[in-house]
Image (cartoon, rainbow, N blue to C red):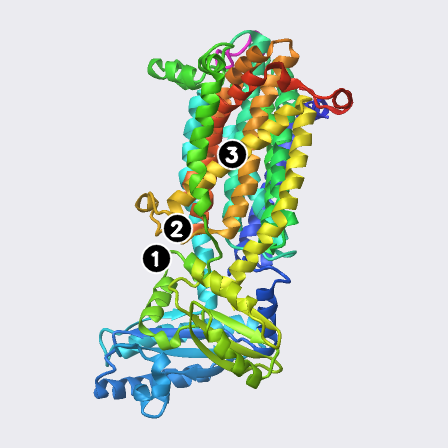
Amino acid sequence: MFDRLGRLVTRFPRTIVAVWALVSAGCLLLALTGLGGDGLFDRLRTGQPAVAGSESQEGMDILDAHAGTAEQVTLLVQDVDLTDPAVVAEVTEALTPAHEGLAGLAGVDQVVDPFVLPDGPSNPAAAGLVAQDRDGFLLAVTLARGLTEDAEAAAHDAVVDRLDQVPGELAAVSPGANGITSSGILMAEDIVDQVKTDLVTGEVVALPVALLIMVLVFGGFLAAGLPLVGALASIAGGLGVLLGLSYLMDVDSFVINVVTVVGLGLSVDYGLLIVSRYREEVHRLTGETATGGATAAGRRSRSRRRRNPLVLAAVRTTVATAGRTVLFSAVTIAVAVAGLLLLTPEVLRSIAAAGVAVVILAVATAVALVPALLVLLGDRMLRRTVLSRVPGLRRVVAGLGDDAPDDGFFSRLARGVHARPWLVLLGSLAVLALLASPVTGMQMRSSTTELLPSGSAQRDYIAAVATDYPAAEAADLRVVTDGTAAEAGAWTEELAAVDGVAEVRGPAELDGYTAVEVFLDAEDAGGAEASAVVHDVRDLDPPFRTWVVGQAASQVDFNAALADGLPLAGGVIAVAVFVLLFLMTGSVLVPVKAILVNVLSLAASLGVTVWVFQGGHGADLLGITPVAGLESYVVAIVVAFGFGLAMDYEVFLLSRIKEFWDAGLDNDAAVERGLQHSGRIITSAAAIIVAVFAGFVAGDLLVIKQVGVALAVTVLIDATLVRMLLVPATMTLLGRWNWWAPAPLRRLHARLGVLH
């Protein structure tokens, strides 16, 4: 298959490049503008992840259906002295036009502020609308229920525009007056806007660093730019795929960053491998380095109509060999990511679908677009680069470049491991265990408004309301029942006796149901104490059915869904990866060892992430505030993508070791030669992908920071400690047993195995 693909690429390079350019441009234009419809960023959703069919989700569905919810827009006015009767009178008069104007807007159902009540802010009923120290107030506008999506959006925008004018109108009677307008829609917009900002920030940081590393690897900008061209095409295609997925399922806002960062990293990795193998093939065919100058054939073949036969042969061999490696790597990653499809939460399924799509795009650009560009560039890729002519840089380029001799740093490293395999093995395992140790204290949470950017006005609004308006505080939990109001009221005494419950309010009738509000004696509504209350309330045995809803309840259900689905998903991934690695190596032990080692590597990376975000180490450096745990879906993302990325480098390394083993070298020599020829590429690819992930850590969204740190640490640990030390040590100790398989499986591999 790859031989045919290589011939196809060398015959129609212009057509392939043109098709990719059109598809990429079309996907990018469609995703950003929508071409008359909604663009991708308009279709993203935000909010707490839910689990369909869970108790908390069923309870929310009951509340939505029977209580009815309408969008509310609230203005928080600060620095207005309501202790002065004269100021109160002036504010009341100044607010009258605004109040009347808001009430007259289409789609507005109700306008409430403390000044419309008898006795104004002094009325006890106004307690939830007046600040504790009486230096501010809330003005709440409720939209009508049952509005169409377009009508609600228009009404919301009109209300926001009018409320934004109020603080300025109050300045005449209270010069220091200022305000913040807030709503669920505005909070969602803040998060989506930050997604856009972080996306640009991440790419601005990551792309130049990636380019610099590849310039050092390849010794010039021309070769270094090819993987980036493939990466940009992959990202553009990925945005188009996400837009399509948004019509099939809900796509959370942060998914776009996760998909972009993974697509960028994989595309660069695969493009790096393809270009490096091409240069190696040129070197093999000519007997000189790929940057050493054009061949005689190349000098004679300057015509556009007649391409250099050496270039065509090198591209075909590259696609047939490195293309197969890239495909195997991509399949292992896709399988790991697809495991999320077996879990119940829809947010994970959308990530899985988008992740698989971007992996396919990454491998497609690597085996088609990048080779086609190599053909079109032709002899220009064979000339000496500018950097190779600079005396001071020539040695740096030669030392870091991809044109590895048969003996060098990595082969010497492998021989050092051969000399002390047990010491290296035990030392590596001890380091991994130490790094993984914080995992034992890991807490998983599902945040809501905590995900707002640190500099967001909406975050300031939430903080101010929580501090100054305790009477307006929303309940931490709500218990929906199908009992009567009398039955639910009698039960509230038992509910109030649960450890951690500070207050119970209600019940309120909801058209056949009742709801009770529960306030907790805990500062963190998503912390361990709140989760414990959820379990205790659900363990009660009232004479009617109950549904516990709220942040902690959704969190408990989400984590339970992960725990229930993990054995099946993990088992399917392990079996699939085992089969793939067996088809590549013909060994039974090598796939088992790879899976176990990658699990250890993954545990270590999660441990470091817990140590940073939950423990607060390096918080100032990252610009974060320590939190009570990692986001639940971040853990799932890291496990799936981290396992796949670790297997990525496993395939890179094993494919070269197997290649030399099949050529007749003994086990240790094959390991040395394979590590020598893949070590620079693995190290360079890892440095690039760490830079990519680190670029996205520079953003402000906590979720993306957690994903970026976790995956960067995964790659860093795997490409250094695991691939350079632990894998050679285990292969040294196993010797010829590395390649063992029972006779029936050997016969199966002979028929179905994929050989380099």
- Residue that label 2 marks: 700
**Residues under labels 2 and 1: Cα distance?**
9 Å
Q: Is residue 293 magenta?
A: yes
**Picture quarter with the N terminus:** top right
Using the rendered image of the protein, determine whether residue 744 is visible from the camera's viewpoint: yes
Tell whether label 3 touches label 2 (CB within 8 Å). no
For badge 2, the amino acid type reads Asp
- Residue that label 3 marks: 600
Instruction: Give the residue furthest to the bottom.
Output: 118
Mark found first going from the N terminus, 2 or 1: 1
Q: Does the magenta stretch include residue 270?
A: no
Within 10 angstroms of label 2, few (less than 14), some, or many (20 or more) residues? many
What residue is rendered at 45% in x and 34% in y?
433
Mark found first going from the N terminus, 2 or 3: 3
For badge 1, the amino acid type reads Gly
Q: Where is residue 381 in the image (x, y as percent from the top left)?
A: 52, 19
**Residues under labels 3 and 1: Cα distance?**
37 Å
Within 10 angstroms of label 1, few (less than 14), some, or many (20 or more) residues? few
**Picture quarter with the C terminus:** top right
Q: Position of residue 141 (x, y in %)?
A: 44, 78
Tell whether label 1 touches label 2 (CB within 8 Å). yes
Mark found first going from the N terminus, 3 or 1: 1
Which residue occupies the foreground of this view, 433 or 402? Answer: 433
Range drawn in magenta: 289-298
**Residues under labels 2 and 3: Cα distance?**
30 Å
For badge 3, the amino acid type reads Leu
**Which secondary structure class fits the magenta region best?**
loop
Q: Where is residue 419 in the image (x, y as percent from the top left)?
A: 47, 12
Q: In which quarter of the image is residue 117?
A: bottom left
